[in-house]
């Protein structure tokens, strides 16, 4: 793969890349580089975490990355996930790894690092303390949105420590690239600011798109929303484990997938903030090889024109805006294809005894925010 092919591939991962020039310089060396992602184990996995993350990780690996995935069990504890029960948190972490194993993530090039092992190293805590000394408290409060907490909420000292720890994770794992969602942007920018102060390179920030929830949960934004309004809108509109109908989960049944997609927000002719169109753009068209397809066919009754062949998302977008494709016909196709993508994961959790036990435990836990 050429330099430009690698860069083009990475640009499909990042909704925002800071900075593209730095990324190009890094991959031009044609050497393996460490890319970092971290995740809080906090309940059942939806397709944004399961399929979309697999797609993005595999693209990064194809471009020369060695991925270090931090199983952030201590961070989840500080953020009171799973009621702060560490045994439950670690069980969910093991379940997540099983999901990615069955989703087709290239695990030969992925290293899972447990935070509970990292924190045993005194040098890690020395790094956390150095980071904590770089800024006033208000700077860490601004970055607290990474935990799904607004600045206006009452934050515990533990949650402020979380911010310093996540910045420390980047440097401790020797990551040159951070590859997380747009919701993690603030802490990644903090790491870029303080890296040179502490003798580290600035991490390159590749932030992926946050997949919309299936339900319409927010009115149109004001023309110039305040930061708090923008944050709250994002929180309302994204997928949520605590609202099962807002997302497809990785072990949902065929019937559950059909029901959720059928009820999803999908106004005719409207592309903006349309979750079904987002599923097509970020999941289905990115998974054609896995689906054994090179195009998508939208089945329609002959009286409405018969099947529609789509060769790209742009093709779909143009036809949908022109109202050549009805929302119900699109939903039927999307439900069938998402079901096909999830089928290997369902089968894994049905047939593998260890995976099945983990899923049963996770389902029994109460989801916490």
Image: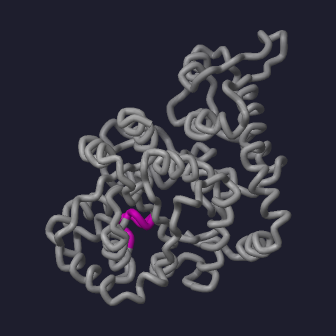
Q: Residue at x 28, y 58 (%)?
A: 203
**Percent from the top left, x then y, of residue 318?**
55, 17
88 or 263, which lies in front?
88
Report if residue 151 lies within the magenta region: yes
332 or 230, which lies in front?
332
The answer to whether residue 10 is left or right of residue 245 is: left
132 or 103, which lies in front?
103
**Residue sticking out furthest to the left:** 197
**Percent from the top left, x then y, of residue 299?**
79, 22
| Rendered position, 20 above or below 119 | above
**Percent from the top left, x then y, of residue 147?**
43, 67
Q: Residue at x 62, y 29 (%)?
A: 267
| Rendered position, 330 above or below 118 | above
Q: Residue at x 36, y 37 (%)?
A: 3
The answer to whether residue 196 is left or right of residue 298 is: left
Report if residue 89 lies within the magenta region: no
Q: How many marks?
A: 0
Question: What colour scheme governs how the chains and residues are painted in the rendered image of this protein?
Answer: one colour
Report the predominant secondary structure element of the magenta stretch.
loop
Residue 361 visible in this rendered orientation of the protein: yes
| Rendered position, 277 above or below 83 | above
Quarter containing the C terminus: bottom right
Q: Residue at x 56, y 34 (%)?
A: 281
Residue 275 visible in this rendered orientation of the protein: no
199 or 18, which lies in front?
199
Quarter containing the N terminus: top left
User: Over which residues does the magenta segment extend?
Assistant: 145-153
**Percent from the top left, x then y, of residue 59?**
50, 45
């Amino acid at each position: 793969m050429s330099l430009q092919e690698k860069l083009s591939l990475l640009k499909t991962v990042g909704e925002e890349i800071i900075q593209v020039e730095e990324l190009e310089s890094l991959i031009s060396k044609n050497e393996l580089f460490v890319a970092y992602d971290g995740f809080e184990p906090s309940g059942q996995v939806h397709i944004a975490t399961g399929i979309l993350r697999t797609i993005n990780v595999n693209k990064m690996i194809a471009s020369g990355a060695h991925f270090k995935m931090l199983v952030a069990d201590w961070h989840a504890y500080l953020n009171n996930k799973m009621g702060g029960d560490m045994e439950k948190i670690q069980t969910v972490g093991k379940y997540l790894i099983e999901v990615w194993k069955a989703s087709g993530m290239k695990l030969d090039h992925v290293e899972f690092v447990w935070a509970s092992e990292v924190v045993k190293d005194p040098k890690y805590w020395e790094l956390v303390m150095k980071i904590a000394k770089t800024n006033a408290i208000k700077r860490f409060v601004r970055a607290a949105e990474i935990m799904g907490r607004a600045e206006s909420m009452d934050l515990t000292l533990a949650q402020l420590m979380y911010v310093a720890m996540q910045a420390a994770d980047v440097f401790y794992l020797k990551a040159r690239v951070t590859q997380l969602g747009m919701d993690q942007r603030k802490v990644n920018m903090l790491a870029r600011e303080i890296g040179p102060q502490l003798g580290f390179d600035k991490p390159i920030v590749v932030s992926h798109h946050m997949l919309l929830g299936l339900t319409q949960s927010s009115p149109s934004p004001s023309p110039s929303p305040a930061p708090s309004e923008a944050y709250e809108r994002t929180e309302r509109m994204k997928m949520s484990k605590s609202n099962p109908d807002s997302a497809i989960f990785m072990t949902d049944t065929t019937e559950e997938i059909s029901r959720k997609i059928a009820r999803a927000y999908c106004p005719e002719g409207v592309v903006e903030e349309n979750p079904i169109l987002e599923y097509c753009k970020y999941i289905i068209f990115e998974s054609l090889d896995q689906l054994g397809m090179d195009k998508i066919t939208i089945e329609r009754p002959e009286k409405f024109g018969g099947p529609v062949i789509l060769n790209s998302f742009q093709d779909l977008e143009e036809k949908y805006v022109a109202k050549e494709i009805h929302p119900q016909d699109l939903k039927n196709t999307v439900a069938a294809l998402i079901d096909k993508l999830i089928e290997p994961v369902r089968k894994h959790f049905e047939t593998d005894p260890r995976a099945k036990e983990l899923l049963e435990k996770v389902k029994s836990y109460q989801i916490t925010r």
